[in-house]
Image (cartoon, rainbow, N blue to C red):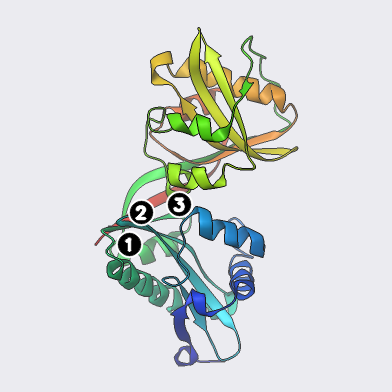
Amino acid sequence: MPEVSDVQFMPASRVSAAQRVAVMNAAYIDYFVPTHVTQDQLELMDRCYDIMPSRSVVARTRWETIGMALLSLRDDRTWISGVGVVPAWRRRGLARSMMAWLIDQARAAGARQIALEVIADNHPARQLYGSLGFREVRELLCWQRPGTADPLPIPFERLIYAPCQDLLDNFEAWHGQPPCWQRELASLRKIAGPLKGYRLDYEGRPAGYCIVGGHEDAVALVDVGINPEAGLLMPGRLLLQALAAIHLGSSISITNVPADDQLNRILAALRFLVTLRQIEMVLDL
């Protein structure tokens, strides 16, 4: 069995995109949520989430890439994602070494804080990040309404198609809780191109919007904004009921909603189910 001393750590920019794809898919094949990405998807992640391959890290032996961890940078904040080691090389301290590399890179970039998300049931990862000084700050909920669920009442109000970029002009004012990195405005502006945007008018004023992706059978709610001046529960409920009517028979999901966000009350009332809980952790540098 190869020794850990045979492993080298280097910037992810020194390996090809194809190698990054291969190691990510190998490392996440048996994860809590199995993940498979294509090279196009990986390059899109780099652009939308401000991932810096030159400050990210891969672990390599003489023959293969066996681990990877990614670092993103926005102003003085950084975000860690994609931490993974292929099964045959786990439990040898490689993840800890890669995390230490990223922490050093974040400091070198002038960052004041590092954030990450970890699945709540992934206790070894939570313990690792805690031992490195990360603290748990909030819970994030992933919700899904199955396509087989009973149909929701169809509201009188109808959704209006609207350009996603125009809807996102309301982002700052129409969110009650700070979003996670993937759903920040900086991310959404970059991924909005192929997505669909809908606006809901209620009592004569714009009351809410949603931006959706996915495909015919599985709709992904990428962002939901509710105008606080129009209320919250009623516009939010009507917005999602109208969306469900458009996509009748399709599952509808949304990821990483902060647990204290009032949107969760609407999702629960419409019989969405929590499918995954994540913990957001931060390290102040």
Amino acid type assigned to the residue bearing label 3 in the image: Ala
Q: Could you tell whether 82 is left or right of 215 in the image?
A: left
Q: Position of residue 201 (x, y in %)?
A: 54, 15
Residue visible at 45% across and 66% down in the picture: 52
The answer to whether residue 181 is above or below residue 34 is above
Q: Could you tell whether 154 is left or right of 85 in the image?
A: right
Question: Which residue is labeled 2 in the image?
Answer: 281
Under circle 3, the secondary element is loop
Q: How many marks?
A: 3
Question: Which residue is labeled 1 in the image?
Answer: 130
**Mark 1 crowdedness (10 Å alpha carbons): few <14, some 14-19, many ≥20:** some
Q: CA distance from mark 2 to mark 3?
A: 11 Å
The C terminus, quarter of image: bottom left
Number of the front mark, 2 or 3:
2
Amino acid type assigned to the residue bearing label 1 in the image: Gly
**Which residue is nearer to you in this view: 130 or 10?**
10
**Mark 2 crowdedness (10 Å alpha carbons): few <14, some 14-19, many ≥20:** many
Residue visible at 46% across and 57% down in the picture: 50
Q: Earlier in the sequence, mark 3 or mark 1?
A: 3
The reply to whether residue 161 is visible in this rendering is: yes
**Which residue is nearer to you in this view: 40 or 242?**
40
Q: Earlier in the sequence, mark 2 or mark 3?
A: 3
